[in-house]
Amino acid sequence: MSTNETLLRARAPHQHHRVTYVELFFDLVFVFAITQISHTLLAHFTPLGVLQTTILFLAVWWVWIYTSWITNWLDPERTPVRVMLFGLMVAGLLLSTSIPKAFESRGLAFALAFVVMQVGRSAFTFLSIPRSQPGLRMNLLRITIWLACSGVFWIAGGFAEGQTRLMLWIVAVAIEYCGPLARFRCPGLGATPLEDWEVEGGHMAERCALFIIIALGESIVVTGATFASAAWTAPTIMGFVVALIGSIAMWWVYFHIGAEAGAEHISHAKDTGRLARLAYTYLHLPIVAGIVVSAVGDELLLAHPEGHADTKTILTMIGGPLLFLIGTILFKRSIRGIFQLSHMVGIGLLIVLIPFAHFLSPLLLSSATTVIMVIVAAWEAISLGSLAKSDEI
């Protein structure tokens, strides 16, 4: 066996590869990145600021999920792969520290770090795949070409300023996100067949579940830090409790049944590449975004629990859970083939709440959205629990 061949994971039918310690270590950079995203959103909550933060969030998610695909194919226990991940961590830390001023003085630093991570990782993987696996090798060649093309716009945007940077980075993000949909079609090379995207489903599901934990953990850290520095009045204490229960409800909605069902389904699916692209690469985006936006809402709640809710408060407190439920219902639809009724009702209740939100205090508004999330979690647990018992009978 050649040195290159030893870098690939050994695979067996329906075998689940555990997430390695080096992958968990790598994720620490993205704990910081998510914190930077939420703080940037809070500090620049204008239409332009939201658009800019969205671009940065899409970039952070994309570089993380691409790395998860790569560690699904390559063995992180091998020294060259570990060194590659450590190199990505260095670039990722530069990326994360550049986020607050990415549209100001640190645009080039952000762009260079992102392009080095995307292109460098994909090129390394291409060189690591033996010629005995031409399908996977050509797939990585196409991916590298696409990322190099988008990299031109990232770096050009880093040199530009103002609206020009924004436009160039929008084009870059569009290229990045259209790549998997187009199966990285390249002139003369064609498109990658979905069978060449085969993944170990259990590992992919576990990696994405861990990113949800990262986002929820960031939400709890923000809640705890804000509460620690606030005056401990009765409304603030109630806000702290409500915010924590909201995070628990989100955990319950995603993890109680959905995460395990997703892991089981993709582990035994025949088209793991297609399912991983849809359910985990794309549909986890609104789930994570919803948690991040909710964290901003929790920080606003603890800062000002009383008075009337302003537009920023309403958008975060309702928009966060709404994004989360939309992403979760679409994710579970891709796994189970049905739209979860409890989630549909939760989405409907959040939308109905919007016209009345201006008349509520931040504490009451957050309490209402938390009650809705608890209802969704309890409804799903009871209904699917009863279904499971009937199947056993």
Image (cartoon, rainbow, N blue to C red):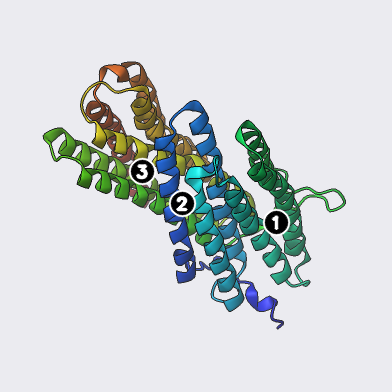
List x then y, in percent, for residue 28: 43, 60
Give the quarter of the image for residue 126.
Answer: bottom right
Three-letter amino acid code at the position of disc 2: Ala
Q: Quick one: 238 or 224, which is closer to the camera?
A: 224
Residue 271 seen from this side: no
- Determine which of the numbered discs, if any, sits on residue 33 in the image: 2
Residue at 57% of width from left, 50% of height from top?
110
Which callout, 3 or 2, points to the residue nearer the camera? 2
Residue at 47% of width from left, 38% of height from top?
327
Q: Residue furthest front?
A: 105
Query: Cα distance, mark 2 to mark 1?
Result: 33 Å
Name the element at disc 2: helix
Name the element at disc 1: helix
* Circles 3, 2 touching at the beta carbon (< 8 Å): no
Three-letter amino acid code at the position of disc 3: Val
Image height of 381 relative to 68, above or below = above
List x then y, in percent, for residue 206: 46, 58
Three-letter amino acid code at the position of disc 1: Glu
Disc with the residue nearer the chain's start (2 vs 1): 2
* Circles 3, 1 touching at the beta carbon (< 8 Å): no
Which callout, 2 or 1, points to the residue nearer the camera? 2
Q: Which residue is mark 1?
A: 195
Q: Quick one: 94 or 256, which is closer to the camera?
A: 94
Q: Give the crowd class for mark 2: few <14, some 14-19, many >=20 residues within 10 Å.
A: many
Q: Residue furthest right?
A: 188
List x then y, in percent, for residue 164: 66, 34
Disc with the residue nearer the chain's start (3 vs 2): 2
Residue at 64% of width from left, 58% of height from top?
116
List x then y, in percent, for residue 45: 43, 31
Query: Cα distance, mark 3 to mark 1?
Result: 31 Å
